[in-house]
Image (spheres, coloured by chain):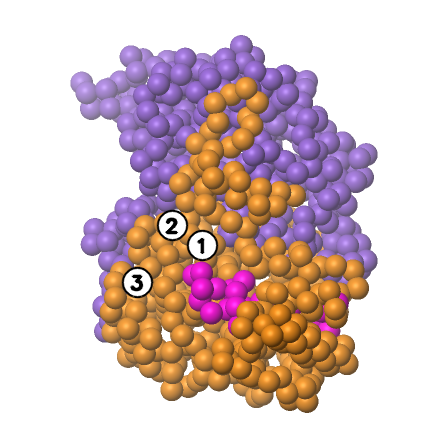
Chain colours: A purple, B orange
C-alpha cells in the first residue's frame, strides 16, 4: 500500500511519476493536494498486535445478526428470480424506512426517501447537489472526516464553529458564519456526535433549525446513531415535523451500518421534495442503484418486528454498559484539567484538556505515541478530526467504547490516565 | 416520481419551488441543468405490459447463480464473525481478479487493483481523478450514458469521434481531437460496445493505444463484456501488456454485473501505479469501501473454478444463440438502407439507416412510437446515446438480445421490419 508520504511526494509535482516512456497524464487540480484521511492513517497506525484499542469507530461484530441475515439471503435468493437484477427501489423497504423515520419523529412521503450506498454516499450526493467551487460548508471544528472527503472534490471548503461537550454545536456561531458568505450547507451529527460524543441540547436544536431556515441554508443531519440512544428515547431528529414547521430544509441521512452491519452498505436520505429528483439523478450517476438483493434482505430483517426490536434492545444494552464503564472509570481516575462528554448515544467519548491546565508542549498526538509505547493503548487524537489546521483538536482525544468489554474498557482508561501522567511528567522535566 | 418536464421546470429558475416559508437553498451550478438519463426514461417508457422489449441492457435473470450465491452467503456468514464489518480489501478476491485480468491479457500487481461499487463507480472515480472544469473527454458519438453522468458534475464536456459498426472507434479521429485541446480521458468500450455492438478491430486497437500514449491522455477501457465473447476467445484488453508496451496509460474497468449479477454492485479498476493512491482516496470518499461481505461471497464463487468456468460457458452459449437469432432474422427481413453490427461479445446489435435511403422526416424516436403502438415492440433509439445533441443517433437504434429466447427474438425482428415499412409508408404518404 502506498503511504501518505508517497502521496505527498507525487503531490509536489502534480503529475505522476512513471507511465513508462509516455508523457504523464494530467490530474484534476483538487486531487493533486489531496491527502489520505488522517483518521484512516491513524487507525492503521494503531492496529498493532497486543494494543488495547479505543481508536476505531466500528460496531461490535459479536452483535451482527449473521444467522438472521444468512437465512434472509437464502429466502430472497430462493424466491426471487430477479433478486440479482437491476431493479427500481424496493418499495416495502422504503415503507419500513418511513416507519423508522416516524420513530425519529419525522413524517415523510415515500418519494422523499432516496436509498444510498451507506451514509457516506448520501453526503457525497448532497455535496454534488448543494456545493460549488468557492462556497463553504459549516461544521464543528472537529467533525466526522467523511465530510471533508465530499467537500474537497467540489472545490469548496469547511468553515468551523464551536461546539461544547455538554450541549453540542453553537447556533449563535453558526449564525455568525452564515452572515459571512456563501454557505451552502450546515453539517452536523446531532445525536451521539462523532467525534465529540455529545447530543445537541433541545434549546440549541430549535435555534439551529430556525437560524438555518432564516438564511435558507439546509442542515444536513447525519444520524447514524439515532437508534442507539442509551438513556430512554432519543430526541426527535432535527428533520422532525415540529422542528422544521418554521420552514427551512433539513436533509436527514440515515444508515443501517451501525444497527445491522456496515458491509450491507445501505443508507438513506430524507429530502425536501424539491430536491428529490436531482438527488436521484446524482445518485444514479455514482453507482446506478443500491443492491436490489441487499434491499430485499434488509427488508426481510425489518419485517420481523419482534427480532428487530429485540436486536436494537441488545445493541443499546451492550453499548450502554460499555459507555458506563468508561464514564465510571474516568470519574475514578480524575484526569487533571480534562473535561469529557457523557454520550447518550453513539460510540464515542471525547476528552479535552484545558490549555491552562497542561504543561507547555502537551498535545494528544505525542500523548498517543506515549500511550502506544508505554501502555499499548490506542485512541484517536482530536487533531485527526480538525476540519481546518489548528482547529483545536490537539488538546482533545476520542475514545471509542464500542469494541471492548467493560472490564477491558476500565483497564484502558487506567492506561490512559497513566499515559497522561507520564506525558505531563516528561514535559515538566524537559521544561525544568 | 418526478418527470423530466418537472425537472426542466425547476431548472428554469435554478432554485427550488417550495421549502415552505423559507428562502430556497442554492443548488450547485451544474445540477440546475442536469436532466434524467434519457436512456432511463426510455426504459421506463417502454416497460408496458404486453410489450416485446429489446430495450433494456439487462443480463438474463435465469442465468444468475442464485443457489450458489445463497450457499456462499451461508458459508461466509457462518464462518466469519467480522463478515459484516468495515474491513480492508479482501486479498484473496484481488488475487482472483488478478487471474481474471491474466485471462484478458493483462499482467498487473495486486496493488494496481482497486475495488469499486460496480463499474459505474469506477468511471466516477476516474472522472474525479482526471477531469477538471473546462476540460474534455473523448468518446464515440453514441456512447454508454453513464459516462455523461460522471463527466457533467466535473464541469467538463464530451467531444465525439466517429465509430463504424464493423471496426469501432476511429483512432485518426481521436488523434485529431487530441490535437484540439485539453482532453483528459479517452473513454471507450472496446469489446461488445454499448450501444454500437462492435468490437474494436486489432489494427485500430494498436493505433488507438499509440495515439493516446503519444499525447499522454489515458484511455479508460470499460470492459463489462470482456468475458462474454461468443466466437472463440476475446482479443486481449487494451490494457494488455503487449498493447501498452509502447507506454501510455490504459485504465481497465471491470465488473461482475454481467457475469454474476448486477445486485452484487462489485467492479474493479486496474490502474497505472502512480494513480493508485489517489484513486483509493477518491473511492473512500464516495462510500468508504465495497461491501466486505460481498467481496467474500464473490471470492467463494470464483474459488470454485469448475463452477465458474461452466457458468461462463453457459452464459456464452445462451447469449450466442440469442445473438444468432437476431442476426439471422435481420438477414431474412433485409431492411432497406440499414446496416448493423455483428457483435462478437456483449448484448447489443446496433442498426443504422443510411440518410439517403430513408424518406424525409424518418428518425428512430418516432419509429419507436410506431413500433410500440402498432407492434408492441420496444427498442432504444440511438439518440438516447448521443453524447452531444445532433450526434447522429436519430438514424440508429439499439436492439438488446440478452433477455428473450431465440424464437421471441426472431419474432421481434419481424415486428421491427413491419414497423419500419409502416413508418416509411406513412412518411411517404405525408410527403406525397
Local crowd at mark 1 within 10 Å, few (<14), some, or many (≥20)?
many
> Which residue lies at the image location 48% right of the left edge and 84% below the top edge?
B166
Q: Which label sits on residue B183?
A: 3
Q: Is residue A420 left or right of residue A290?
A: left
Q: Is residue B78 left or right of residue B35?
A: right
Q: Which label sits on residue B150?
A: 1
Residue B360 placement (x, y as % from top left)? 54, 73
Label 1 and label 2 in one chain: yes
Report how far apart the C-alphas of labels 3 and 2 lie in the structure: 14 Å
> Which residue lies at the image location 77% right of the left edge and 45% below the top edge?
A300
Q: Which label sits on residue B154?
A: 2
Q: Quadrant of the C terminus of chain A?
A: top left
Local crowd at mark 3 within 10 Å, few (<14), some, or many (≥20)?
many
Q: Nearer the viewer, residue A417 or B38?
A: B38
Report how far apart the C-alphas of labels 3 and 1 lie in the structure: 15 Å
Q: Nearer the viewer, residue B424 or B25?
A: B424
Label 3 and label 2 in one chain: yes
- Tag 3 near tag 2, CB within 8 Å: no
> Which residue lies at the image location 61% right of the left edge and 46% below the top edge?
B3
Q: Label 3, secondary structure: give it.
A: strand
Q: Nearer the viewer, residue A385 or B80?
A: A385
Report how far apart the C-alphas of labels 1 and 2 lie in the structure: 7 Å
**In which chain is the residue bearing label 2?**
B
- Residue B413 is drawn in which quadrant? bottom right
Residue range (magenta): B376-405
Amino acid at each position: 500500500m502506498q503511504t501518505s508520504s508517497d502521496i505527498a511526494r507525487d503531490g509536489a509535482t502534480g503529475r505522476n511519476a512513471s507511465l513508462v516512456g509516455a508523457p504523464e497524464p494530467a490530474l484534476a487540480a483538487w486531487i493533486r493536494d489531496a491527502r489520505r484521511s488522517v483518521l484512516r492513517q491513524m487507525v492503521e497506525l494503531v492496529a498493532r498486535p497486543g494494543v488495547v484499542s479505543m481508536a476505531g469507530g466500528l460496531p461490535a461484530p459479536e452483535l451482527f445478526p449473521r444467522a438472521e441475515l444468512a437465512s434472509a439471503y437464502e429466502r430472497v435468493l430462493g424466491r426471487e428470480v430477479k433478486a440479482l437484477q437491476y431493479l427500481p427501489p424496493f418499495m416495502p423497504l422504503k415503507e419500513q424506512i418511513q416507519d423508522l423515520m416516524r420513530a425519529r419523529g419525522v413524517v415523510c412521503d415515500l418519494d422523499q426517501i432516496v436509498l444510498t450506498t451507506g451514509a457516506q454516499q448520501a453526503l457525497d450526493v448532497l455535496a454534488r447537489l448543494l456545493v460549488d467551487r468557492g462556497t463553504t460548508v459549516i461544521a464543528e471544528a472537529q467533525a466526522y472526516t467523511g465530510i471533508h472527503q465530499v467537500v474537497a472534490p467540489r472545490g469548496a471548503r469547511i468553515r468551523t464553529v464551536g461546539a461544547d461537550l455538554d450541549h453540542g454545536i453553537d447556533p449563535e456561531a453558526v449564525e455568525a458564519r452564515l452572515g459571512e458568505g456563501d454557505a451552502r450547507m450546515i453539517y452536523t451529527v446531532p445525536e451521539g456526535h462523532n467525534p465529540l460524543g455529545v447530543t445537541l441540547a433541545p434549546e440549541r436544536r430549535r435555534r439551529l433549525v430556525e437560524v438555518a431556515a432564516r438564511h435558507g441554508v439546509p442542515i444536513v443531519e447525519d444520524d447514524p446513531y439515532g437508534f442507539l440512544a442509551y438513556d430512554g428515547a432519543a430526541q426527535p431528529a432535527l428533520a422532525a415535523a415540529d422542528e422544521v414547521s418554521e420552514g427551512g430544509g433539513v436533509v436527514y441521512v440515515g444508515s443501517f451500518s451501525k444497527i445491522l452491519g456496515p458491509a450491507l452498505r445501505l443508507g438513506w436520505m430524507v429530502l425536501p421534495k424539491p430536491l428529490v429528483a436531482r438527488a436521484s439523478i446524482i445518485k444514479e450517476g455514482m453507482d446506478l442503484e443500491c443492491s436490489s438483493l441487499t434491499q430485499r434482505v434488509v427488508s426481510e430483517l425489518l419485517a420481523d418486528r419482534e427480532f428487530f426490536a429485540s436486536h436494537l434492545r441488545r445493541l443499546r444494552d451492550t453499548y450502554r454498559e460499555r459507555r458506563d464503564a468508561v464514564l465510571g472509570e474516568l470519574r475514578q481516575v480524575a484526569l487533571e484539567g480534562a473535561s469529557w462528554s457523557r454520550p447518550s448515544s453513539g460510540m464515542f467519548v471525547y476528552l479535552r484538556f484545558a490549555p491552562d491546565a497542561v504543561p507547555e508542549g502537551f498535545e494528544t498526538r505525542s500523548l498517543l505515541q506515549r500511550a502506544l509505547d508505554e501502555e499499548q493503548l490506542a485512541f484517536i487524537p482530536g487533531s485527526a478530526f480538525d476540519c481546518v489546521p489548528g482547529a483545536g483538536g490537539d488538546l482533545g482525544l476520542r475514545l471509542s467504547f464500542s469494541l471492548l468489554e467493560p472490564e477491558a474498557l476500565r483497564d484502558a482508561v487506567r492506561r490512559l490516565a497513566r499515559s497522561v501522567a507520564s506525558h505531563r511528567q516528561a514535559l515538566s522535566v524537559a521544561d525544568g
